[in-house]
Image (cartoon, grey):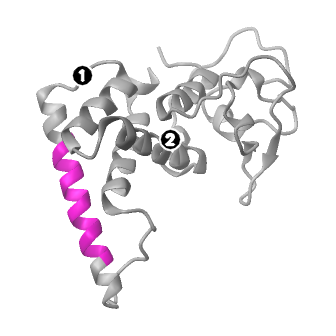
Amino acid sequence: QRLEAEIVRDRILATSGELNHQMHGPPVSVRADDVGQIVVAAGVAGKRRSVYVQVRRTMPVSMLRQFDMPDIKVNCEKRATSTVAPQSLTLMNSSFILEQAEAFARRLQREAGSEFEAQVRWAWQFAFARQPTEQELARGLTFLAGQVAYLEARDASAATGGQEAKKPSGLPAPLQALTSLCQVLMGSSEFLY
């Protein structure tokens, strides 16, 4: 059974280490971002549990709406549960997910150190509450090594003015590779179900 929309958001924040545990008080405001998506306000207050997020009929939070939050325009006796492409696209492109994946990667570097094997083991522990299988560990290590090699080659090409070089993200290659792995884990079925 897939987690409810609010729990998905809360789980992402908890996994990244960004969840604000403050209880009670006024609701967290929502606003439109630069592309017109309705998002939770920025800052520490915006990382409170979803139960504290302001609910406005005219401004449903885009991420929560994608994951079947109740329709507040009418009485909602039972939540619908769907599995649709926009959910995956949200997990790939949402600025919230990208920020939380980077926060998760930074948490892993802080708590697991700089060794990829320890980072992969801790990533599985934080995301799934279990250790990775040997196959998952091997795949995670292969992914990180391949991503770092690709990113370093891309950055070197950009530094020398290569025509097909993309603009570097500003993150060191190991952190950027780990961020990509964290985003994959948070978008996986095991994380959402």
Identify the mark nearer the N-term, 1 or 2.
2
**Rendering quarter of residue 22:** top right
Q: Residue 16: x, y in percent?
A: 49, 35
Q: Residue at x 33, y 33 (%)?
A: 123
Mark 1, residue position: 131
Q: Residues within 10 Å of mark 1 (few under 14, many from 20)?
A: some
Q: Nearer the viewer, residue 107 or 98?
A: 107
Q: Which residues make up the magenta segment? A: 140-155
Task: Check contact, mark 1 vs mark 2: CB within 8 A.
Answer: no
Picture layout, residue 175 above or below residue 140 = below
Q: Could you tell me how far apart the alpha carbons at marks 1 and 2 are, in whole angstroms?
A: 29 Å
Picture layout, residue 53 above or below residue 172 = above
Q: Nearer the viewer, residue 115 or 12?
A: 115
Q: Is residue 130 left or right of residue 80?
A: left
Picture layout, residue 129 above or below residue 39 = above
**Rendering quarter of residue 33:** bottom right
Picture layout, residue 113 above or below residue 124 = below
Q: Residue 137: x, y in percent?
A: 17, 34
Secondary structure state at the residue bearing disc 1? loop
Q: Residue at x 29, y 74 (%)?
A: 154
Q: What residue type is disc 2 on? A: Ala
Q: What residue type is disc 1 on? A: Gln
Q: Residue 187: x, y in percent?
A: 43, 37
Q: Is residue 43 left or right of residue 188?
A: right
Q: Nearer the viewer, residue 151 or 65?
A: 151
Please identify the quadrant where the C terminus is shown.
top left
Q: Residue at x 65, y 28 (%)?
A: 20
Q: Residue at x 66, y 32 (%)?
A: 64
In terms of secondary structure, what is the magenta stretch mainly?
helix
User: Is residue 66 covered in magenta?
Assistant: no
Q: Is residue 164 visible?
A: no
